[in-house]
Image (cartoon, rainbow, N blue to C red):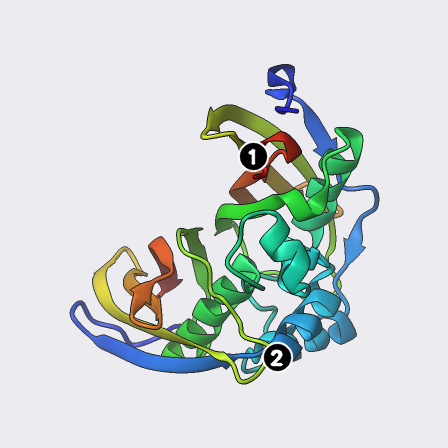
Amino acid sequence: MPVDSSLVGREFPAPAPLTITSDRVAAFAAAVGHPGADVPPTFPIVLAFDAMQAFLDAERIDLHRIVHGEQRFAYVRPLAVGDELSATLTVTGLRQIGGADIIATASELTDATGAVVCTGKATLVHSSAEADQ
Amino acid sequence: MTAQLAAGDVLGPTTFTVTRADLVAYADASGDHNPIHQDEDVARSVGLPGVIAHGMYTLALVGRAVAEWTGGAEVVDLGAKFTSPVVVPAEGGAEVVVGGTVKSVADGLATLSLEVTCGGQKVLGMPKAVVRA
């Protein structure tokens, strides 16, 4: 079933904040081979993914029918160990191409003071079951 | 940290080998357990050619290459379209090649022009990184 077009404009917060710990950063850096002790630039996806999963759960969309089409991050400041981040995903656009839903989203990550530390833009490509051969 | 970068500087190319084990480790570190990155049958069931790398894993390799080239310069923008999947075989791995040039340096920011390929084919569309220079 195509995704409901009334979704555009709706917001989906990540269920819980994420505190950046040195262990978490080390595990992520090890998994991608990132050098040094800085927080890798793609680390915010950990929390952005939680917000996306909240959206998928709310709309009963299966994760395995989603392919990541695009992701861009803009950083207001470097992320640091000790930051407590919250994330909210907003559906910004929806179109259909060849039986797939192209879902445009924007996400905003804020720290414990409420200041925006990072923004993201993503497209999610959803292939619905009816489109399968 | 700032990097000594000048327009026209050639960065890399740097080659990374991506294995199924890397994708398992990345799934654990990032929380993205989409089975299209683990399970051949699920991947094929949604029309993919096989198990594919997380787009964010490929983008993390770009972040890693940029960190290695610039000595850990602060990243201000990072993003790409995931235009072609990185198919990761069950045995061995897929080779992802990340190369770049410094497109411009202005106002303390260096914009990098990047090319990311696998098997000679571009896998990222409009990849972009901006770092403090």
x%, y% of residue B121? 31, 65
How many other residues sit within 10 Å of disc 2, few (<14), some (14-19) or many (≥20)?
few
How many other residues sit within 10 Å of disc 1, few (<14), some (14-19) or many (≥20)?
many
Q: Which quarter of the picture shows residue A29?
A: bottom right
Q: Amino acid at mark 1?
A: Thr
Q: Which quarter of the picture shows residue A44?
A: bottom right
Viewer-nearest residue: B13 or A38: B13
Q: Chain of mark 1?
A: A
Q: Is residue A118 visible?
A: no
Q: Is residue B36 visible?
A: yes
Residue A37 bears which disc, if any? 2
Q: Is A78 placed left or right of B33 in the picture? A: left
Residue A105 bears which disc, if any? 1
- Quadrant of the snapshot with the C terminus of chain B: bottom left
- The image shows residue B103, relative to residue A131, as above or below, that is below
Q: Chain of mark 2?
A: A
Q: Amino acid at mark 2?
A: Ala
Residue at position x 60%, y 39% from top?
Answer: A107
Residue at position x 70%, y 45% from top?
Answer: A63
x%, y% of residue A118? 57, 48
x%, y% of residue A68? 54, 48
Q: Which quarter of the picture shows residue B120?
A: bottom left
Viewer-nearest residue: B64 or A96: A96
* Sequence-wise first label, 1 or 2: 2
User: Extreme front residue here?
Assistant: A133
Dots 1, 2 in contact, CB < 8 A: no
